[in-house]
Image: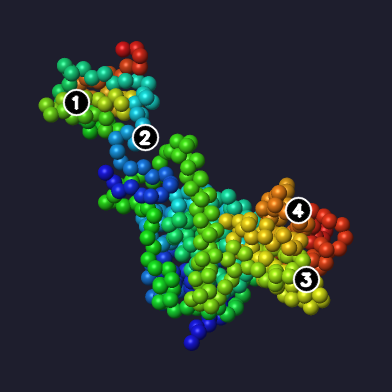
């Protein structure tokens, strides 16, 4: 945790959700098919928001609190284990 | 022994800046500021200035470079004029809202078109609402003193605001006058090391200039307003301290000259205010009870002081600027300070636009016009239809 400054200006400190739950911005939601996933971790590397979490067994989980639904993970997945579905239509 | 330097306003400003030891100077030359940049370059060559000089491609970049440097927690200085200042406009807001104490000299020059390099205050007046503290100087000695005081004021943690030191093109920027220069040790002792309120630091990661929600933005504006109020209290302390140390007093928010028994008080800024002293001496010899209140800080504005002056005397305002569609800026500000607190007679003159000379004889004439005849709101002094 960074040291806080006693100043009134626009400074933000690195922490989870410093801009609120940005997952609410999402229009398309990534759905992971665990049966297809080969644990290559390309989605984990490419996610621009760090919302793809790596679990101990090497599998991945997407944090829907912060995933903005950009679809990069689905795009880079070599085995097409991730599909983008419009919110509320799954 | 006193060290007296006889030189131009610009050279003396550069000398003061270098003695404050800014870590970074980023500036772009523009007439009539150019010789400030030249002087700093010569101080680098001679080894007198050991900081970083960033040669930028525009004034927008000069201010951006100063903001970037100041955000890392170091002392910064720049100088500009007229169109250069206007090109900085966006970044002026940035420096103030980020609470970075950049110090800048602005040499008041006409804004074009109608290309003209002479004195006129419309350039800095149009930056009034950027959140910068604005000083207006009327002698080379005052330029020196104010540059040093500006660092002290802006860097104070209760203020933490950028400071603009304005002085008239050529009348001060290119005119040699004597100025007493303290020793480097005296300046070092006076200023001390700059301790920033915040800084970007890889060891302590933060994001600066991020998105914020309305209620937080409102808080930032309010804090800036409070900082200006703090500056209002601090400026008299700094100038008093300066007087005790160096025996010189250029005024605090206002410089008063022969105001004690005055029945009329003239309010002006910059070089016109210096010239007014001669006019006042002459008028007093004729038996007129007139004094001068030279507005030294336009932001924060000395409302309370002006109300006090209005209890004893009528006011005459001379503006070397015009807010087209209304009137001279100082005239507006003074009347706003007086609202519901005084019903004194206030006369406003517009004079010296485009660098037109305003001599003490003109000022005497303005005074006599204002005390006689019908009261008028704004008078364009000496306005003449000129042939193309």
Q: Secondary structure beneath disc 3?
A: loop
Measuring 49% from the left and 71% from the top, which residue is drawn there? Answer: B241
Looking at the rendered structure, which numbered label has been put on residue A19?
Answer: 2
**Foreground disc of the pair 1, 3:** 3
When the figure is inspected, residue B368 is found, relative to residue B231, above or below; the finding is below
- Are dots 2 and 4 in contact, CB under 8 Å? no
Give the residue at mark 3: B289
Looking at the rendered structure, which numbered label has been put on residue A60?
Answer: 1
- Are dots 4 and 3 in contact, CB under 8 Å? no
Badge 3: chain ID: B
Of residues B311 and B102, which is closer to you in this image? Answer: B311
Q: Secondary structure beneath disc 4?
A: loop
Visible in this render: residue B264?
yes
**Foreground disc of the pair 1, 4:** 4
Q: Quadrant of the C terminus of chain A?
A: top left
Visible in this render: residue A48?
no
Looking at the rendered structure, which numbered label has been put on residue B343?
Answer: 4
**Foreground disc of the pair 2, 1:** 2
How far across and down, in percent of the image, does residue B220 sit?
Answer: 47, 45
- Are dots 2 and 1 in contact, CB under 8 Å? no
- Are dots 1 and 4 in contact, CB under 8 Å? no
């Amino acid at each position: 945790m960074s040291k806080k400054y006693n100043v009134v200006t626009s400074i933000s400190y690195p922490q989870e959700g410093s801009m609120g739950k940005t997952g609410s911005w999402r229009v398309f939601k990534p759905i992971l098919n665990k049966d297809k996933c080969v644990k290559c971790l390309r989605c984990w590397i490419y996610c621009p928001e760090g919302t793809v979490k790596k679990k101990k067994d090497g599998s991945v989980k997407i944090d829907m609190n912060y995933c903005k639904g950009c679809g990069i993970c689905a795009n880079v997945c070599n085995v097409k284990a991730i599909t983008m579905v419009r919110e509320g239509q799954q | 022994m006193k060290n007296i330097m006889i030189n131009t306003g610009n050279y003396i400003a550069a000398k003061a800046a270098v003695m404050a030891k800014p870590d970074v100077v980023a500036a772009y030359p523009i007439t009539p500021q150019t010789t400030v940049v030249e002087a700093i370059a010569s101080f680098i060559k001679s080894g007198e200035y050991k900081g970083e000089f960033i040669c930028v491609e525009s004034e927008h970049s000069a201010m951006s470079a100063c903001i970037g440097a100041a955000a890392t927690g170091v002392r910064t200085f720049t100088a500009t004029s007229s169109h250069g200042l206007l090109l900085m406009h966006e970044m002026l807001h940035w420096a103030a809202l980020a609470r970075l104490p950049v110090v800048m000299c602005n040499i008041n020059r006409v804004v074009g078109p109608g290309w003209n390099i002479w004195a006129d205050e419309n350039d800095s007046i149009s930056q009034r609402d950027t959140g910068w503290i604005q000083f207006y100087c009327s002698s080379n000695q005052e330029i020196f003193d104010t540059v040093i005081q500006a660092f002290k004021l802006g860097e104070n943690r209760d203020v933490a605001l950028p400071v603009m030191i304005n002085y008239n093109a050529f009348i001060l920027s290119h005119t040699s006058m004597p100025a007493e220069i303290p020793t480097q040790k005296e300046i070092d002792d006076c200023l001390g090391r700059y301790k920033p309120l915040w800084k970007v630091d890889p060891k302590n990661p933060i994001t600066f200039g991020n998105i914020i929600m309305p209620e937080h933005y409102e808080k930032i504006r309010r804090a800036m307003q409070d900082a200006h109020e703090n500056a209002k209290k601090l400026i008299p302390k700094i100038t008093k301290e300066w007087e005790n140390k160096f025996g010189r007093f250029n005024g605090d928010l206002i410089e008063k000259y022969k105001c004690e028994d005055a029945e009329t008080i003239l309010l002006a800024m910059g070089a016109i205010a210096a010239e007014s002293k001669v006019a006042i001496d002459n008028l007093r010899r004729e038996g007129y009870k007139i004094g001068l209140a030279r507005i030294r800080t336009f932001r924060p504005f000395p409302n309370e002081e002006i109300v006090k002056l209005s209890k004893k005397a009528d006011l005459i305002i001379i503006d070397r600027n015009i807010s087209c569609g209304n009137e001279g800026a100082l005239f507006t500000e003074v009347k706003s300070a007086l609202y519901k607190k005084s019903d004194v007679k206030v006369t406003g003159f517009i004079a010296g636009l485009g660098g037109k000379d305003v001599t003490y004889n003109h000022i005497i004439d303005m005074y006599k016009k204002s005390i006689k005849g019908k009261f008028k709101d704004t008078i364009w002094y000496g306005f003449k239809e000129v042939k193309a």
